Every structure is written in structure tokens, then in C-alpha cells.
Amino acid sequence: MEDSFSRNAYVGNGRKNSLINQKMICRILGLLLFIEGVMLMVGAAVALFYHESDYIYFVYSTLITVGAGGVLVFLGRNAENRLTRRDGYCIVAFTWILFSAFGMLPFYISGAIPSIPDAFFEIVSGFTTTGATILDNIESLSHGILFWRCFSHWIGGLGIVFFTIAVLPIFGVGNQVLFSAEATGVTHDKIHPKVSIMAKWLWTVYLILTVSETLLLVWGGMGWFDAICHSFSTTATGGFSTKQSSVAYWNSPFIEYVIAIFMMLSSLNFSLYFMCLKGKFRHLLKDDEVKGFLISVFTVTLFITVALIINNHYDVEKAFRKALFQVVTVHSSTGFTTDDYNFWPPFTWMLIMYATIVGGCTGSTSGGIKVMRLLILLRNAKNELARLIHPRAVFPVKINRQTVDPLTISAVTTFTLLFLICGFVGWVLLMMMGVGLTDAFGTVFSSMGNAGVALGNYGPAFSWSGLPDGAKWVLSFLMLLGRLELYAILLMFVPSFWHNR
């Protein structure tokens, strides 16, 4: 159960293989932009289906994206077919940045979002499955633009690079290094020795969840377009809606419960679902992280339910439903809303922020520090207290009855510390730009946790359009930082990373 940073072997030996393979990086980035061009055409197809003129903006965006991809492929001609870990981190970091830069084109060119900082913020929020928006009149957008927002969630849900791992072998460039660089969680249960096949199986589970929720939402009274868009957002734990008031627009307990259940399902380790398909249900039922996540969700829900009954005078069912939905939406880092918790008792805000920072399970589409890391930290802290009483005793940290390696415990501690440090720096930067203390705290940790809803003036009932442009750039960076679990982005700022030695 080692962290991918300490587990994956360095590819290649000697000075030659330690050089960053710039041509191969360009070639792969170019191929990925070709894939994004195909995805943009899906948005054009939706606009054409609804007889909207916006399709032409997706065509323009596709031509620009494919053109840029062609230039990169040309620059990568005759590339040596090898990848090191450094190459993998470069590809992952630049892929998310390039996908965002070109993915915002339909917003900007069409005039739906005429500001570059706003358009970039919106698409980064989409691809990173954060769900925060700067839009104040979502219903005025065309079907093509609305679809592209939610589709960006679905693309980014399991990871842009992870998706392409299933496709790149066609071009002869599939590699374990890309998976290792994009997926930097605590543990990765390999369900198949070939990463490309594993990616295809996990995307199959992803598709099953999406289709199942779509059918249930349609049954519950949603139209097909809204149901598909909300299923994209839910399965990806994103949070973009086709309505300004989000899920509250439908005022339907059935729809709220369906989305809440699928938000929880999408927050669990997807490899466990694959085990269930093979008949190994005990892996899901006995998993410590799953149990920890569900205990956390229902404990916080219980406290808030009681508070809403006493302080807000909700009836029992409504209090439970509103509490459950809001807790799940932040614990899963989704970002849908059905109630404004700014009007709830103040102590519930801290419970909401706790759930935002912790997030869901490893191996899922959710963000945050992750429940697995929290379990390791708590069990290690318990052992440290026991060691004060019995200094010579050995107290191993165990997850799923397996002893966690000390290097993994160290990596988890380091990650959590870095997460909080980055959050604190972002918090200070936003306050320097004039954002209030509570607003800055909420937006920063919501961005890093990819949750999409914050506190105060940027709570669940408000968009983030009022933020200064500088703050939007900072938060966009923090969304990418949180989505790639820090390292793939932070490594780009380490001078030694670029040294060819």
C-alpha cells in the first residue's frame, strides 16, 4: 500500500534516459489535443440537434485545437518512444493546462463568457470537477454551451490522462508512467496488470453509473437533456447544473435522493465496483475507507438534521433530506445545492468545511485530502499516544488488516501538510486582493478540495463572479493543484526537476 510517489520505479538508466523527452511530450500533447477536438465536436452536435447557431463556435474551437495539436505532433516527429517519470509529470500538468486553455474557447468565442479570466475559471472548474461558477444567468445559455460545461466534468472526472490511457495505445504511446503521474493517491488497487485495460474497465463502471442515474432522473420527472447533464456532473462529482438554482429548481425529494445516492456511489473507490462485478462484494462491504466515509457522512448528517429541526423548524424528513444532500454534496466534492446553509446554525458551517476538506475516497472522482489519508493520520496519532504509555511497544498502522508502510505514513503526513500550507498561502493571497477572511477561506479550500461551494458571499446561493480577476486566476491554479493532488503541479516549480542529470 505504497504511495505512487515512492512506489513507481524510475524508467530508464543513465544520463540519456534522464533527459526530458521534449519531442515525445509534444507528440502526446498533440494527440491529446486531437482527442479534445473530437470532444468539442460533440458540443457542436448537441447545438445542431437543438437547431442553435452556437455550433459554429464549437467548429471554430475544434479547428484551433486540432491546428495546435498538429503543430505539436509535427514538433514531436521522430520522437524516441520512451517516457520517464519526469516526462509523465510534464505531460499530465501540461495536458490539464492545455485542455483548459482550448476548452474555454467555446465560452469565449461565442460571447457566453466574454472575459478570459472568467472563461478560463469556468472551464478549469469544469475539467477539475470543482463546479464553482461565475455565471449569474445559466438558463440564458444555449444547449451546446450548457452541455459542454457538464461534459467537461465528465471528461475530467476519472482524469483526462486516465481516459486517454485507454486510447493512446492505439498510437503506440500508452505508458504506466502517465497513470502514475495522474493518479497520485495513497493506494491503487490494480484490477488488471495492463493499465490500459484497467482504464477501460473503470470507464465501463463510470458509464454504468452515468446511464443508471440518467434513467432514474428521467423517471423522476427531468427532461432527457437535464438528466444527462446532471448525470455527467454527479458521476464526475462536479456540480455544474443547467439551472441557476441547481437541483433546488425541481423541488423534488425523489430527484434529491437519487442525486445524493449517486454522489455517494461516485465517491467510493471505483476498483471496488469492478470487484463487485466479479462477485467479490466483500471488498466493498469490508473496506475501511468506505466504512469511514459512510460513518463520516451520516454522523455529520445526523448533527445537522437535529440542528435544522431545532433551529430552523424543518420537519424530520425535510431536515434529514436537506442535511444529507448538502453534506454529501461537499463530502463528495460535487457542489450541487438544494438549500442555503448560510441560514443554518453557524456550527454547521464548520462541519460543512470539514467535509469539504476531507472529500471522498481514493480511486474515485472526488477531491479533497481523501478519507484514506485521514484514517492513516488518525490511526497513527492514536498509536503515538499509546507509545507515550508503552515506549517499547510496536503499534503498526493497519488499513484493511494490512500494515501501512512507514514511508506511506510519512508521505501521507507530508501531503496533508502541503495541502494545508498551499491552502493557507492561497487564503492570504485572496485576502491581499480584498476578499474577506471567511470568503477567502471558503473559496480557497473549496477550490483545493474541488467542492465548488463555499461560505458567506460565495456560498451555495451565489456565483463567484464578484471575485477579482486575480483571485480567479489563483483559484483556478488551486483547482488544478487539488485535482492533481499537488505533486504534478508543484514539481513544475522545482528547479532540479528541469535539470538534465
Image: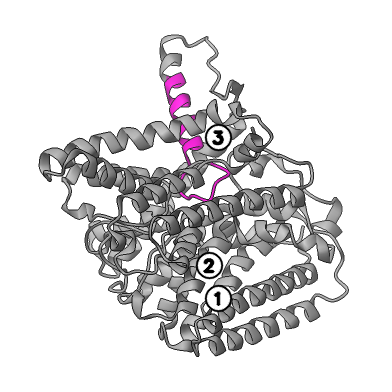
**Distance in Å between CA atoms under marks 1 and 2:** 8 Å
- Residue at 20% x, 54% y is 342
332 magenta-colored: no
Identify the residue at image location x=60%, y=22%.
403
Return the residue nearer the eye: 335 or 68.
Answer: 335
Mark in front: 1 vs 2: 2
Is 364 in the magenta? yes
Tell me what residue is drawn at x 28 percent, y 44 percent.
Answer: 321
Q: What separation in Å lies between label 3 and label 2 (alpha carbons)?
A: 34 Å
- Mark 1 residue type: Gly
Q: Main structural element of the magenta stretch: helix, strand or loop? A: helix
- Can residue 439 be seen here? The reply is yes
Q: Which residues are magenta?
A: 362-384
Viewer-side residue, 431 vs 27: 27
Other residues around mark 1 within 10 Å, as few (<14) / some (14–19) / many (≥20)? many
User: Disc 3 on helix, strand or loop?
Assistant: helix
Q: Which comes sooner in the sequence, label 1 or label 2?
A: 1
Q: In x, y percent, where is residue 353?
A: 31, 47
Q: Say which mark, if any, is on residue 168.
A: none
**The C terminus: image quadrant:** bottom right
Instruction: Provide the residue designation for mark 2.
Output: 152
Which residue lies under the disc numbered 3? Answer: 410
Please indicate, yes or no, whether residue 450 appears anywhere in the rendered image. Answer: no
Three-letter amino acid code of the residue under disc 2: Ser
> Contact, CB < 8 Å: mark 1 with mark 2?
yes
Q: Are marks 3 and 1 in contact (CB under 8 Å)?
A: no
- x, y percentage for residue 33? 67, 74
Q: Position of residue 166 (x, y in %)?
A: 73, 57
Q: Quadrant of the N terminus?
A: top right
Q: What colour-coding does the image apply?
A: one colour
What residue appears at the point 37 percent right and 50 percent down from the top-left corner? 329
First-in-chain label (3 vs 1) = 1
